């Protein structure tokens, strides 16, 4: 190992040989044991490591309090809707059920007012719930299990 490579190892990983890459550690330790220039580089790096470990940043009390402060909980519309739909208490089971029932009712209402195109340019629209229920009641299953009018 050359002295330049040892300098790169020291700059990158510090003065502790346990942090150096395993495949280069033995060569670096061999160079350190036989070269006074390498020992000087390692000693300088160890001093720098100790100085960095001992350094405490000077943060004013107000800034430290701001860094340690917790953010207030968000309370936007989406969070309130999700909190209502997915309650944390097991006793509030009715909220998700009522939301699902409202969605189902809306789907039935929209589905019953949609015009169905028959392919010949004419459309069939269901005018009332009574007509829809009457047509559903007339359907009877045939022998194959399919419903037919």
Image (tube, rainbow, N blue to C red):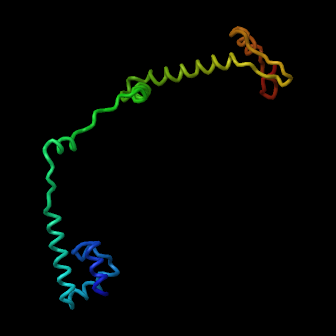
Rendering coords of residue 93 (x, y %): 43, 24
- In the rendered view, tell whether residue 52 sits above or below residue 72: below
Quadrant of image for the N terminus: bottom left
Q: Seen from this angle, which residue lies furthest bottom? A: 34
Quadrant of image for the C terminus: top right
Q: Nearer the viewer, residue 53 or 124?
A: 53
Residue at (14%, 53%) from the top-left corner? Answer: 58
Based on the displayed image, in which of its 4 quarters is residue 147 positioned? top right
Horizontally, is 98 left or right of 62 in the view? right
Based on the displayed image, in which of its 4 quarters is residue 129 positioned? top right
Based on the displayed image, in which of its 4 quarters is residue 46 positioned? bottom left
- In the rendered view, tell whether residue 133 sits above or below residue 27: above
Please state the total of marks drawn on the protein image: 0
Residue at (27%, 85%) from the top-left corner? Answer: 3
Residue at (58%, 21%) from the top-left corner? Answer: 104
Q: Seen from this angle, which residue lies furthest right? A: 120
Rendering coords of residue 120 (x, y %): 86, 23
Horizontally, is 96 left or right of 50 in the view? right
Horizontally, is 2 left or right of 81 in the view? left
Q: Which of 47 and 22 is in front in this view?
A: 47
- In the rendered view, tell whether residue 79 sits above or below residue 23: above
Rendering coords of residue 59 (x, y %): 15, 49
Q: Which of 145 and 41 is in front in this view?
A: 41
Rendering coords of residue 83 (x, y %): 39, 28
Horizontally, is 60 left or right of 147 in the view? left
């Amino acid at each position: 190992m050359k002295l330049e490579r040892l300098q790169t190892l020291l700059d990158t990983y510090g003065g502790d040989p346990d942090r150096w890459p395993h495949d280069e550690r033995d060569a670096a330790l061999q160079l350190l044991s036989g070269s006074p220039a390498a020992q000087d580089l390692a000693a300088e790096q160890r001093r720098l490591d100790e100085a960095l470990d001992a350094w405490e940043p000077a943060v004013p009390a107000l800034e430290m309090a701001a860094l340690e402060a917790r953010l207030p909980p968000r309370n936007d519309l989406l969070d309130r809707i999700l909190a209502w739909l997915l309650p944390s208490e097991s006793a509030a089971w009715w909220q998700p059920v009522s939301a699902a029932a409202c969605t189902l009712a809306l789907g039935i209402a929209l589905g019953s007012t949609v015009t169905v195109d028959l392919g010949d340019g004419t459309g069939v629209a269901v005018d009332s719930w009574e007509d829809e229920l009457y047509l559903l009641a007339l359907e009877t299953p045939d022998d194959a299990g399919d419903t037919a009018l």
